[in-house]
Image (cartoon, coloured by chain):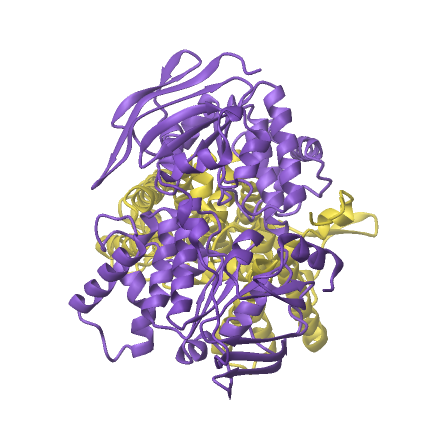
Chain colours: A yellow, B purple
Amino acid sequence: MAGVTKKQSLWGRLTNPKYIMVYATIAIFLVIYAFGAFLYGNKGFLTVRTFVNLFIDNAYFGISAVGMTMVLITGGIDLSVGAVASLTGMFIAYGTTVLHLHPLTCIFAALVMGVGLGLLMGWVIHYLNVPPFITTLTGMFFARGVCSLISRESIDIHHPMIDALAGWKIYLMKFADGKWVRIKPIAFINFNVILFLAMILIGAFILQRTRFGRNIYAIGGNEQSAALMGLPVGRTKVLVYGFNGLCSVLAGISYALYVKSGWNLSLQGGELEVITCAVIGGTLLTGGVGYMAGTLFGVLLKSIIPALITFNGNLLSWWGKIATGLLLLLFICIQRVITASAGKR
Amino acid sequence: MPGKNILEMKGITIQFPGVKALDGVDFSLCEGEIHSLLGENGAGKSTLIKCLTGVNRMDEGKIILDGREIHPTGPGNAIELGISAVFQEINLCPNLSVAENIFVGRQPMKHGQIDWNEINRRAEELMSRFHLDIDVTRPLSYYSTAIQQMTSIARAVDIQAKILILDEPTSSLDENEVQLLFTVMRQLKESGMGIIFITHFLDQIYAVSDRMTILRNGHLVGTYNINELGKVELVTKMVGKDMDVIFSLKRAEVKDGAEIVLKAEHIGDASKINDISLDLRKGELMGFAGLLGSGRTETAEMLFGATKTVRGDIFIDGEKIEIKQPFDAIKARLAFCPEDRKRDGIIGDLSIRENIMLAVQSRKGFMHPMTRQEQEELADKYISILGIVTPDCEKKAGELSGGNQQKVILARWMAANPKVLILDEPTRGIDIGAKAEIQRLMLEMCKDGVSVIFISSELDEIIRCSTRIIIMRDREKVAEVDGSTCTQQDILRIIAEGAA
């Protein structure tokens, strides 16, 4: 029998091969960050503000990536997230500005819509055995279509509650000369950042500490085996898409707070950005592997590239797309190599 | 001695389209008993098991567990009822840790969250009962098939199943691992578990079983105590005809001066193979013997271009050729049936017809498609030559039994009319009747002038059929012996000692 000795030490746990992809993400993030620090350190790249802005500008992608990571771990995919988030924005904008409803009513309606659509898509995928790609593509067209039915104009959001929530911020402080002062340059975190980090923690708890979460991994590892082990495959898959619907709606709320408007064409292609975050965060597109920590760094890694381009000042922002593309390619290649070498064992 | 009956299956009948898979079969299992279930492929063993685990619905009959009639609705339900099954194809999740594979779906909880320490501790305890001292937190895919198999059993044990079904658990284990498994089985039996054991190794049946039940073509032949029936009688009952076929097989003979078809000189690659030379003559059957991992499969893959050759030369009909990929090999009229037929050989979703025509079509090139009629003729021809049991050639290959799938793969390459046919474990996991059949077909092809390389873990098969035998050890060829003069002991000694 294979002579693998027992290792239960912290080191043994940390070197568990299943974490390789997460380490790769973190390492590449650190390399790029160090690169930025080297080039633009004197321009303020190293400030806390730059770092915190990575979160602020991408929180809505990150929130959606939490749900997407789970979907990808089951071996599925969800293309509807961008459209559902956009539709959420439309609900809030049209509801508050045109219909004069309370934002919470709009958010509630959006939640029913998003989670309902997610559950429905999950049901179709599992019980009607329609490939996730097709099912969620349909969901995407549906949500995008409803967006345009509501309005084809961008609608501004004006409501005291929304304004308060969007304007709410915690300034980062430091202790100097015996009292707390705001750090310079001013840096703060807002509701979106807190929601993003909370979702990452909730996602991690679900994945690592609940049976539901472990069933997600089992299904991604081998769906047939999972069924033969008596796991509730159908229920789990339906709920995963439902949870992803919830994440899409939260991402939509977060985006609405960020831009304070709703537009039927907003977040087009957003689903692909979200998938990119998850994949460069080490989630395998073939399912079975993925961690929230990886997704967190995937979001940071994807958002540091536009930041670098901004600091450079001379480059066209489209270089960001190319760099992201290359990064994605790199990660897919690493994944192939790792899965191939694991298969050879 | 076995206690009271815990399971009784009465008059089980299952109808599949065109075939009666089971016809009024009775089966019973006692507490603390190991009961072997025997029969050829297609006899209905798997169907009976699937019926018990709720995968297949029965059309007639009833199942009584502990005096109560049950209707298992699926594997999950069967597990709740106390029926666990461990299959030949390991049904676990490769991405989860060993420990988690044992506990997934019923993880111990603490404060509303999964208690990982408890999982790992208990998994370690379970594995150490099987004398396995491994890191249970590593992913399952990190370990050998044997350990994966044990993990599967550990899961069943921890569920505290009343009935454990072991479906061909030993086909990928080596001798020590088999003994270990038997020790575990006896332990479980002592604790009162009823075990249904399915295997095609006759010795293993006699080593552990208390009783055996024999099925043939979906009918019950009978249930016997283990000392009631000798091996020959047993096989006769299973096959339904005498063992003459297997004993009448004639070793492949090579005429003097037969030309060399395939010649390999000092081939090797970076890591798997050190140095192999061989020459295969027309109509010869060359056996590859050696332990698992000795390089048998790797050599075959290299000859076929499935893995890259780094050193050495390959000649076909005296002409040196480059085999960089399987396509080159197919062009040179080599054919290869890989070991893992589910993964590398059969395409389960395609029909028998489509599976058979693949190689022929690929040689002709896709610019020259075969007509539907040609395809059907071809498929029907091989279905009848090889005796593939199926209602028609449109049945999905994945729905056939293991032996029949193997025949379909064989048909694919026979139809391609190869010069050299490489068969890697063609008889693995199939029963005696089908094995004899496959061996007969192989030898007949040799008679027709095809050269065959035959890889098998079962030495008696190799010795029975081979003209010459190449013995491998530690990724090297250590000896070449004459099939007609060597004995099983000779080969074992060479494998053990490393030299002729």
Residue A100, given in percent of the width and then of the height, sits at: 30, 43
**Which of these two is toward me, A55 or B218?**
B218
Residue B66 showing in the rendered view: yes
Residue B201, given in percent of the width and then of the height, sits at: 52, 41
Relative to B419, is B396 on the left or the right?
left
> In which quarter of the view is residue B474 placed?
bottom right
Name the residue rendered at 54%, 68% in the picture. Answer: B300
Name the residue rendered at 41%, 11% in the picture. Answer: B67
Q: Residue furthest right?
A: A177
Residue B449, given in percent of the width and then of the height, sits at: 40, 73
Where B326 falls versus B167 (above or below)? below
Where B207 falls versus B26 (above or below)? below
Residue A327 showing in the rendered view: no
Where B220 falls versus A117 (above or below)? above
**Which of these two is toward me, A260 or B184?**
B184
Residue A194, given in percent of the width and then of the height, sits at: 57, 47
Relative to B136, is A257 on the left or the right?
left
Relative to B42, is A44 on the left or the right?
right
**Which of these two is toward me, B412 or A341?**
B412
